[in-house]
Amino acid sequence: MEKTTDVLLLTMNSSEEQETVCIFGTGDFGKSLGLEMLQCGYSIVFGSRNPQMSSLLPNGAEVLSYSEAAQKSDIIIMAIHREHYNFLTELTEVLNGKILVDVSNNLKIKQYPQSNAEYLAQLVPGAHVVKAFNTISAWALQSRALDASRQVFVCGNDSKAKQRVMDIVRSLGLTPLDKGSLMAANEIENYPLQLFPMWKFPFYLSAVLCVFFFFYCVIREVIYPYVYEKKDRTFHLAISIPNRVFPIAALTLLALVYLPGVIAAILQLYRGTKYRRFPDWLDHWMLCRKQLGLIALGFAFLHVLYTLVIPIRYYVRWTWTNRTIAQAIAKKERPFSTSTAWLSDSYIAMGMLGFFLFVLLGITSLPSVSNMVNWREFRFVQGIPCQDS
Ligand SMILES: Cc1cc2nc3c(=O)[nH]c(=O)nc-3n(C[C@H](O)[C@H](O)[C@H](O)COP(=O)(O)OP(=O)(O)OC[C@H]3O[C@@H](n4cnc5c(N)ncnc54)[C@H](O)[C@@H]3O)c2cc1C
Ligand SMILES: NC(=O)C1=CN([C@@H]2O[C@H](COP(=O)(O)OP(=O)(O)OC[C@H]3O[C@@H](n4cnc5c(N)ncnc54)[C@H](OP(=O)(O)O)[C@@H]3O)[C@@H](O)[C@H]2O)C=CC1
Ligand code: HEM
Ligand SMILES: [Fe+3]
């Protein structure tokens, strides 16, 4: 409800300051952005190939031809596809000196030799092109989906033009991130097309580790007893073997999280400086330590869950009762061994402590937490090597 009051207040108090913004294109994105901006107090002029067909546009917005609309504002948001930019060459005159906001995305990475924003700057050299809004979907704008990312990467060669666009981004309640000059447009256009780029290597590595340890355990715990002792241990596939694979994979990945740091430190000592780039393989490995660490934490969680069910497993209960009955029949007592008690309790205590530290690392890697600590505090917590059982 307060939203409407805000808009009313904004509109009432600042109608004289109402900024007019022009939006080229009356498609999904143009419409959603136009509606949002109207609600935030901007006055909107749409440019369209068929101004008379403007039924579905937000009321309160004017719809004119592209060249007429361009004259109404010094900032024009290009809500059209790159493939349709060529008509802009006929409007160079009226677009001269204006701020053109390129919001376009491509269908795949490296679809064109140069970014859409640089292509636009080439078509209309007299205008100031700023890249923005391409990471925000029309749907997120309409539905105000809070889960969708609210970060808007902005780049452009003219700092004043960039500032104007970043002010619009802020007034829409989004977060502008200045990525520098128009050279960054390529990276910004690739951003919505990426699919967990930093998780690929960690995922593949974890899969290879799991498959390797799984087959090793199957040979040792199922095939070997079957061949040599004719014992059917296939039921180990369900819990026992995964409860070996997960903790071992967790520990191996944890080691791979801290190993590159050591290699990096040795390399720096050997080179006598820390200001030279690492080799690409080490750089990439260093950059995906967070993902390796979080996957390791996932495996540790699974191990804890699988361990907690040990006492209720049929096989375990059967073994325990059987052992007790056999002892009763043989009238043999098994003396209590303090050292065994010490060993097993410290084994489990180490696991729990290790797990606590592990979860602590995971918590500090949450952006909302890591943004609250300074670099030294972050390094302090993250640099605690996970001591585990
Ligand atoms: C559950 C879990 C969550 C994790 N979450 C995160 C996370 O959110 N973010 C994260 O970054 N890591 C995360 N990690 C990985 C790991 O904890 C951190 O990367 C930690 O900082 C590694 O500490 P380190 O001392 O091994 O390496 P570093 O602190 O990186 O230092 C290693 C050496 O390399 C040098 N060095 C490091 N980077 C550079 C550089 N760019 N240029 C020049 N020299 C450099 C340092 O001076 C030092 O000599 C996580 C790990 C786990 C297990
Ligand atoms: N949809 C989304 O969620 C997002 C879209 N974007 C970007 O916004 C831009 C617009 O996307 P979207 O609104 O979805 O696309 P639409 O196809 O829905 O709309 C594009 C608009 O461009 C105008 N246009 C101008 N010339 C032509 C032409 N020759 N052929 C077709 N249309 C033309 C049309 O408006 P008219 O008929 O009035 O002239 C049309 O409605 C694209 O660059 C897209 O990458 C960025 C982020 C998210
Ligand atoms: C609450 C925390 C934990 C508890 C209670 C716990 C307990 C146990 C138990 C009972 C076993 C024997 C399981 C079996 O034989 O079937 C075990 C095995 C093991 N645990 Fe955990 N542990 C915990 C956390 C961890 C963590 C965080 C790690 C490492 C990341 C870890 C690594 C291991 C390893 C490597 C094994 C041996 C697997 C094998 O070869 O059988 N443990 N732990
Ligand atoms: Fe353990």
Image: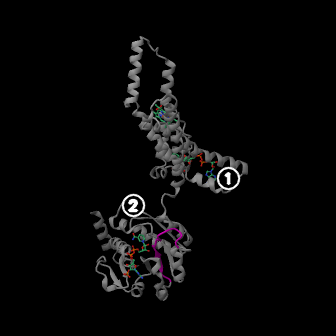
Q: Looking at the figure, which quarter contains the N terminus? A: bottom left
Name the residue type under label 2.
Ala
Closest to the camera, between mark 1 and mark 2, is 2
Instruction: Give the magenta part as a residue range.
Output: 97-111
Instruction: Choose between 84 and 163: the one closer to the eye.
Output: 84
Q: Position of residue 14 (x, y in %)?
A: 34, 74
Nearer the observer, 316 or 79? 316
Earlier along the polypeptide chain: callout 1 or callout 2? 2
Ligand 1 is within 8 Å of the C-beta of the residue at disc 1: yes
Q: Residue 274, which numbered label?
A: 1
Residue depicted at x 39% and y 13%: 329
SS of the residue at dot 2? loop
Give amino acid for label 1.
Answer: Lys
Mark yes or no: residue 250 visible.
no
Q: Position of residue 74 (x, y in %)?
A: 44, 81
Q: Position of residue 47 (x, y in %)?
A: 38, 82
In the shown orientation, is residue 235 left or right of residue 209?
Answer: left
Q: Is residue 25 visible?
A: yes
Callout 1: few (<14), some (14-19), or many (20+) C-alpha neighbours within 10 Å?
Answer: few
Specify whether residue 123 is painted magenta.
no
Snapshot quadrant of residue 9 = bottom left
The numbered mark at residue 56 is none
Q: Are marks 1 and 2 in contact (CB under 8 Å)?
A: no
Residue at far left of view: 1
Query: Gap in Å between the C-alphas at discs 1 and 2?
Result: 38 Å
Of the pair 217 and 354, the residue shown nearer to us:
217
| Residue at mark 2 | 148
Q: Main secondary structure of the magenta part?
A: loop
Left or right of 308 on screen, residue 221: right
